[in-house]
Image: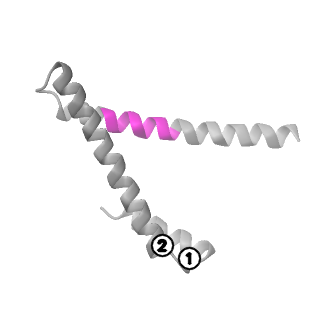
Amino acid sequence: MKKLLCLAVLGFSLTSAQAATDQQSLVGTCNKEAADRQGKVRKAFVKKCVSDATKKERQKQKKCDHEARGKKGDERNRVIYDCLREP
């Protein structure tokens, strides 16, 4: 039981660590784009940049989920995987 709990906690922490890394990468990219701005203008630009990028990602996930409807198991996973990898 303790091993199972430890594995669950470890899996969750790895997932959240990856999400934090992705978010940090996104903020870094937006910061580079905002290099010529300063102060409140820069902060507003980065906030909008990150927000727009996460909206695009959510829209892409919804699109891929829609494409995978009616499929199950490995076939569904493959369709979603391929769809998310598209540029």
Would you say residue 5 sits in the magenta stretch?
no
Q: Would you name the residue on which mark 2 appears? A: 79
Query: Is residue 4 toward the left or the right of residue 18 in the image?
Result: right
- Residue drawn at the location 15% of the way across and 27% of the way down: 35
Mark 1, secondary structure of its residue: helix
Image-quadrant location for residue 41: top left
Front residue of 78/70: it is 70
Q: Disc 1 versus disc 2: distance between alpha carbons? A: 6 Å
Query: Is residue 37 toward the left or the right of residue 46 in the image?
Result: left
Quadrant location, the C terminus: bottom left
Amino acid type at image mark 1: Glu
Q: Which residue lies furthest to the left in this view?
A: 36
Q: Residue furthest bottom?
A: 70
Looking at the picture, how far across and down is residue 18, in whole percent? 51, 40
Looking at the picture, how far across and down is residue 15, in whole percent? 57, 42
- Residue drawn at the location 29% of the way across and 46% of the way down: 52
Mark 2, secondary structure of its residue: helix
Q: Do the residues labelled 1 and 2 touch (CB within 8 Å)?
A: yes
- Residue drawn at the location 73% of the way across and 42% of the way down: 8
Which residues make up the magenta segment? 18-27
Looking at the picture, how far across and down is residue 69, in whole percent? 52, 76
Amino acid type at image mark 2: Val
Query: Is residue 4 toward the left or the right of residue 76 in the image?
Result: right
